[in-house]
Image (spheres, rainbow, N blue to C red):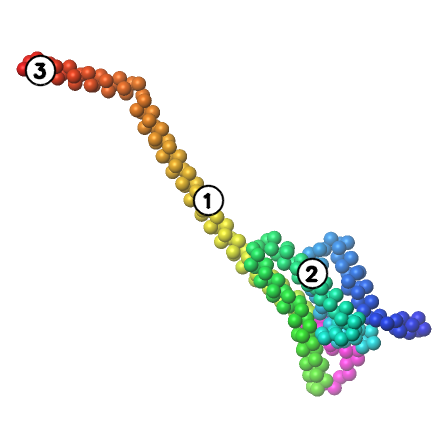
Amino acid sequence: MDLVTLCLKIPNLGILLYYLIFVVIVPYILIYANKLSVLKFYMPIMVAFAHLLTKVGSSEMFSSLYQLNPVEFVPFLSSNFINVFSLFGILWQCIDFSRKYNLTNSIIYGILLFIVALPFARVGLKFVLDHVDKYLKEKTKMEYKYNWHLIVFGLLYIIFILGIQAILMTLVGFSGELSVASINNVNNVNNLDKDIQKLENTNLKNNSNKSTNNGNNPSKKFVNKFMLSNIGNFNKRMRKNK
């Protein structure tokens, strides 16, 4: 018990535990398991986990972990580092999204993801937890030790945020596939027009070559001369008969 008490007296112990688990251990496990696709979705949710621990956890351990309006240096540094980490995950997703679809869809997806990852996880989570706590304490007579009701509803809210993120990715990705398909169709039509134009030009060249070759044919020239000589002899005979 003395060791536990001593550990609890360490300043900013909650911040150290959060960063050790959520910033070091979990990303390391995902990278070691080659789950980078999961890591880029995990990073924006760190804001929601930090805010939930600040609202639900012990005030002595997690009060300085993540504050909406930090005043002191430690909460300011911790909150902004988590925000930067989350923004890096959003940027990572946008870059991967732009490799599959166009730039416009990537920007739209980034804006929607930013709204879900930060305002929803900050102000939205606070709003939900405050109203759930007030409603349950007014309507029920249960004892909520360790704020377990806030933990349950907070985790459900985080799952809700993940569901919204998946829906947004599906919708924007579907529209991106439609735009890519339309661009490909336009390119195919343009290529078809170019092929038709090349075929027409080739036919015109072949016809012109045939006409020139027909004019230079020696047998045709002989026939033409023979016909001209016959016409000349016929005219001479007609003059003698006169």
Q: CA distance from mark 2 to mark 1?
A: 40 Å
Q: CA distance from mark 3 to mark 2?
A: 107 Å
For mark 3, give the secondary structure: helix
The one nearer the camera, 97 or 128, is 97
- Mark 2 residue type: Phe
Number of the label disc, if any, that sits on residue 191: 1
Q: Farthest residue in the top direction?
A: 240
Residue 207: image quadrant is top left
For mark 1, give the secondary structure: helix
Question: Seen in the image, is 204 located left or right of residue 147?
Answer: left
Residue bounds of the magenta highlight: 140-157
For mark 2, give the secondary structure: helix
Residue 212 in the magenta stretch? The answer is: no
Q: Residue 199: horizontal and vertical position, in percent?
A: 40, 37
The one nearer the camera, 133 or 68, is 68
Question: Seen in the image, is 159 located left or right of residue 101?
Answer: right
Mostly what secondary structure, the magenta segment?
Answer: helix
